[in-house]
Amino acid sequence: MIRSAILPLPYSEPLVADHGRLRLFSGSANVPLSQEVSRYLGIDLGPMVRKRFADGEIYIQIQESIRGCDVYLIQPCCYPVNDNLMELLIMIDACKRASARQITAVIPYYGYARADRKTAGRESITAKLVANLITEAGASRILAMDLHSAQIQGYFDIPVDHVYGSPVILDYLISKQLPDLVVVSPDVGGVARARAFAKKLNDAPLAIIDKRRQAHNVAEVLNVIGDVKGKTAVLVDDMIDTAGTISEGARLLRREGARQVYACATHAVFSPPAIERLSSGLLEEVIVTNTIPIVPEKQFDQLKVLSVANLVGETIWRIHEDSSVSSMFR
């Protein structure tokens, strides 16, 4: 039997927050998640007018006084990425001009994160560009979840609280009591993430898929490093986009004798043809969180969506109270 190796987090019951200077606002990208966070904190989402001009320009107006308040803006930069990012920037600017004391951009999914370094000549490092935009707009602090690469924290010249969706996924996996677990990294770059994941599962063995990426969103899987024969393989990644890496990895694990294959990721980007690949029968279950809203047409039988609202809410409360965030994950 696997025991949870995670420190129990004190977010099983909603907080009764002292409203004080804490204000919470939601962008349009993931209103259901924002509503769950507000229920956990025990405060209402702030009133805000959000509309578009005839040419598509976004208009934001905060409809209550936030002078001297600590404002938290919840807005993942998911599809449509450019619109949601621009909305976040305008929300930050509106709060800055309304004399908010501190503005924290709560970004459950940080877009443009995959271009985090130059791998060829004349490329843009968009992860740094977006960091600059958010900082210049007036954000005082960033709260992000499962950044594509940890070094993105260093692209900001303001404090960054980087939290993880893994405790929610781990608790779910532990509750299933899966036998003969082996944690699989879908590529060499994800080994650190998979190793940390395996450690929380009673030091489960680790396997690595040797992958070569021929182009963006195109992956060629070569072989498995490690023993998966007769075992329950759990593929762990930060996001699933077109699901090429996950589906090819699952196919290879089946060929290598894995008895069952599960896929876990924090961010369900699910760009076409992800749904066809994930629902093809290669995977027993695809476990994701609700950092990105999953519309009905992107749902399928094998999909399991877990909520990170309590985790985000607890983090916001700890930031507001100047208490430790990292202790939640020890």
Image (spheres, helix red, strand yellow):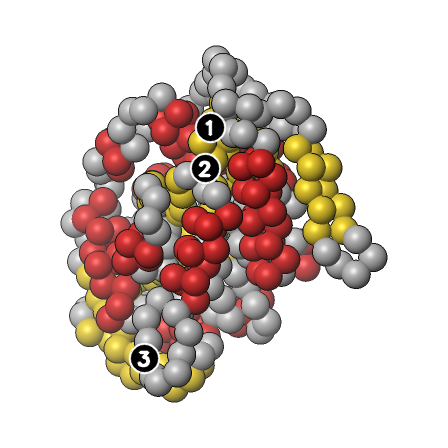
Residue 66 relative to residue 165: left or right = right
Residue 255 relative to residue 6: left or right = right
**SS at mark 1?**
loop
Q: Disc 3 marks which amino acid?
A: Thr
Nearest the camera: 64 or 190? 64
Which callout, 3 or 2, points at the residue further toward the start of the chain? 2
Q: Disc 2 marks which amino acid?
A: Thr
Residue drawn at (54%, 19%), measured in percent from left and top?
A: 42
Which callout, 1 or 3, points at the residue further toward the start of the chain? 1
**SS at mark 3?**
loop
> The C terminus is located in which quarter?
top left
Report the label total: 3
**Crowd rating for badge 2 (residues with CA inside 10 Å; few <14, some 14–19, many 20+):** many
**SS at mark 2?**
strand
Is residue 316 placed above or below 263 in the rendered structure?
Answer: above
Nearest the camera: 46 or 302? 46
Residue drawn at (43%, 49%), measured in percent from left and top?
A: 135
Residue 165 found in image quarter: top left
Which residue lies under the disc numbered 1?
101
Is residue 229 placed above or below 38 in the rendered structure?
Answer: below
Could you tell me residue 312's position as x and y percent?
Answer: 44, 35
Which residue lies under the disc numbered 3?
119
Q: Disc 1 marks which amino acid?
A: Arg
The Cα–Cα distance between marks 2 and 1, rounded to whole angstroms, is 10 Å
**Crowd rating for badge 3 (residues with CA inside 10 Å; few <14, some 14–19, many 20+):** few
Residue drawn at (65%, 45%), measured in percent from left and top?
A: 28
Which residue lies under the disc numbered 2?
104
